[in-house]
Image: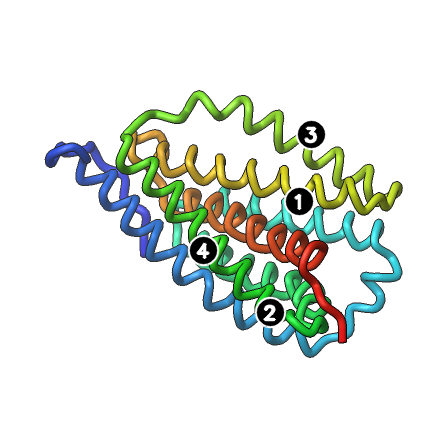
Amino acid sequence: MQPQLQVPVQTGQFSVTQNRVMRNTYLMLALTMIPTVIGAMIGMQLNFGVMRSNPILSFVVILAVFYGMVFAIEKNKDSGLGVALLLGFTFMMGLLLAPLLQVALGLSNGGQIVALAGAGTGVTFFGMAGIATVTRRDFSFLGRFLMVGVIVAMVAIVANLFLQIPALSLTISAIVIVLSAMILLHTLSQIIHGGETNYVSATLTLYISVYNIFSSLIQLLMAFTGQRD
């Protein structure tokens, strides 16, 4: 799929370009789930003891790789390489999800927790998509607030690496879910109103938000409903 930029042609309430970007974004987002699942399945067979024993160093390395790949994807978003990098990125994110899944599935109700997290993520995504599409309101005003919120959340995450406060960890997970849901709304609104014209870039933002919602929901559900044998 090659991003195509052209002068919008109005057809009803959406332009041809906006429809194309929205359609390609949804298709690409669905496609990214395949390497994510494959990565998670492979990761489930691996031993992440080194990461668990060195959480701060692991976090720094993961953060560097994460932002390095995000930069590379954005740099090549207008080419097929951008699509390939995006799929590689989602495979890596699947691998990184594996340690959390290992812990969750180690609980007696782990399968139910993962399923509930998946359902909750789906409801959140389609809920935000429905609001953006039905109301047709321009939510671009959320941009600055979301930027500040992401920075604050990142600072809190780094701080808790040293503090290791369970209550703070749960609070961060709840904040991440709210922020990610609002980012979904903002991004989808940008597509609808022509502020986002590249489906690779849009898919990347939506994917990261969906990923964060899913992983944060798992952590919250484990904390409040997790059952050990």
Closer mark to the observer between disc 3 and disc 4? 3
Q: Residue 20: horizontal and vertical position, in percent?
A: 24, 46
Q: Secondary structure at mark 2?
A: helix
Q: Earlier in the sequence, mark 2 or mark 1?
A: 2
Q: Are marks 2 and 3 in contact (CB under 8 Å)?
A: no
- Amino acid type of the residue that numbered disc 4 sits on in the rendered structure: Leu
Q: CA distance from mark 2 to mark 3?
A: 28 Å
Residue at image location 32% in from the left, 56% down from the top:
1
Q: Residues within 10 Å of mark 2 (few under 14, many from 20)?
A: many
Judging by the rendered image, the residue that carries numbered circle 2 is 40
Which residue is tagged 3? 152
Which is nearer the N-term, disc 1 or disc 3?
3
Query: Residue 197: percent from the left, percent from the top?
Result: 33, 37
The residue that disc 4 covers is 81
Density class for disc 3 (Cα within 10 Å; few <14, some 14-19, many ≥20) is few
- Residue type at mark 1 is Ser
Q: Quadrant of residue 28?
A: bottom left
Q: Nearer the viewer, residue 153 or 222?
A: 222
Alpha-carbon neighbours of circle 1 within 10 Å: few (<14), some, or many (≥20)? many
Q: CA distance from mark 2 to mark 4?
A: 23 Å
Which callout, 2 or 4, points at the residue further toward the start of the chain? 2
**Number of the front mark, 2 or 1:** 1
